[in-house]
Image (cartoon, coloured by chain):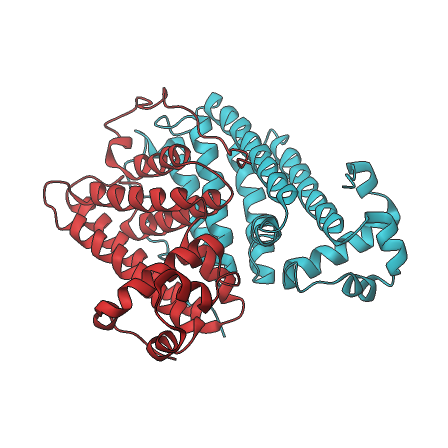
Chain colours: A cyan, B red
């Protein structure tokens, strides 16, 4: 299988087909997206596409790699901002992901579409698991920084908090796929982040956001 | 579409085909399971199956209904035990669900298989959302009882906690589908429940389970 490096993914001739394929796979799923659809969307011919990627599965893996690299860079940039701090970095990247999920009403590209492909192909499901493990490690690193700054709930370790954040985002993705909206999902994510924060230890016994609109599982819009 | 009531689902002649179909759909998915597979597994003939359910989609809806009624009854029984209390009831039902997910290595029947079918059929995706909303309400009722008993983290409302539990279980289901094991998922669920519990407010500033084995996103077993 072709393994495209981060450098190759940034080759000018590959950016347009990867982005077009990403939109198509995300909105339509894997089965419903053909190489012809990518040809139509980009004007790049079929021969050149096969030559660059090897096939539809390899094109999908290139899309996943590009998706993941983009989010990783976003997270590292947010995390390197000493003003915002680690909890703000987690919030910023999660807000971005939730907006992307709900804009398309199609959930999470990495988890939902990849789960569809993962039924046929072991390489895809293993790549998804390795991405999830990398995100978990990045979250753990951020929460370790938060702990050092006294911002982490003392009832929890950075490892436990990172696992909880991953599960929460997977759940948020499943809800987005079933028609939940951005506002509802942000409220849900904020509940999780609030429980991970130190202020919900001894310092704050007030129910700080009792006035928040309650989160409900909404019916999908017709 | 045939709407089977709880009474009809308990008709002695339907229990065997519904249970057989549940196992098949759960392990193989919807597309890979045919009416012939159900005939083979139960010995009930094709004509009788069509006569009782109407078709494959209606059989799947009957399986979903049966799955949901079973879990609802389990939850209500656990919740009516005054000894255990509401947090114990939530833990008991969640443990049962996690065991069921990991025994088959196939995630959650309701969310994962139904999401596959929901791509073709609006009635299925709407039924799933109404089930999720019912579970959310049951969780909210349990957390309202927990709040009255002084067992809920005061930083959170029963509504917020219930939404978090739903998202967490959806995430746990997604991880089970990708090969995560029972122990890992129970640790993750327990982290969530611990954060929802009152003892993580002012009373307990100790990191009570710092010695727990850390949760990691595991590679799927070959």
**Circle count:** 0
Q: In the image, A139: left or right of A161? A: right
Q: In the image, A146: left or right of B155? A: right
Q: Is residue B56 above or below residue B150?
A: below
Q: Which residue is pictured at 28% across the width and 58% down the height? A: B137
Q: Is the N terminus of chain A in the top left, top right, bottom left or bottom right quadrant?
A: top right
The answer to whether residue A180 is visible is: no
Image quadrant assignment for residue B73: bottom left
Q: Position of residue A25 (x, y in %)?
A: 67, 58
Q: Position of residue B103 (x, y in %)?
A: 38, 42
Q: Which residue is pictured at 61% across the width and 38% down the height? A: A131
Q: Which residue is pictured at 54% across the width and 29% down the height? A: A142
The front one of B83 and B203 is B83
Q: Which residue is pictured at 71% across the width and 46% down the height? A: A61
The front one of B138 and B53 is B53
The answer to whether residue A89 is visible is: yes
Q: In the image, A97: left or right of A206? A: right
Q: Position of residue A87 (x, y in %)?
A: 51, 35
The front one of A83 and A181 is A181
Q: Is residue B49 above or below residue B24?
A: below
Q: Position of residue A166 (x, y in %)?
A: 49, 40
């Amino acid at each position: 299988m072709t393994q495209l490096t981060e450098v190759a993914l940034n080759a000018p001739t590959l950016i347009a087909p990867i982005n077009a394929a990403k939109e198509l796979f995300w909105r339509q799923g894997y089965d419903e997206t053909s190489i012809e659809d990518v040809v139509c969307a980009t004007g790049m011919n079929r021969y050149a596409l096969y030559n660059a990627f090897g096939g539809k599965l390899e094109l999908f893996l290139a899309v996943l790699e590009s998706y993941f690299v983009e989010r990783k860079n976003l997270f590292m940039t947010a995390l390197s901002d000493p003003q915002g701090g680690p909890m703000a970095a987690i919030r910023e990247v999660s807000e971005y992901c939730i907006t992307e999920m709900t804009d398309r009403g199609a959930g999470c590209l990495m988890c939902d579409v990849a789960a569809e492909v993962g039924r046929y192909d072991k390489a895809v499901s293993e790549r998804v698991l390795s991405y999830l493990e990398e995100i978990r490690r990045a979250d753990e690193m951020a929460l370790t920084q938060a702990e050092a700054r006294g911002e982490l709930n003392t009832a929890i370790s950075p490892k436990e908090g990172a696992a909880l954040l991953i599960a929460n985002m997977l759940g948020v993705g499943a809800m987005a796929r079933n028609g939940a909206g951005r506002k509802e999902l942000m409220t849900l994510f904020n509940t999780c982040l609030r429980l991970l924060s130190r202020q919900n230890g001894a310092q704050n016994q007030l129910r700080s956001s009792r006035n928040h609109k309650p989160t409900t599982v909404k019916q999908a819009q017709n």
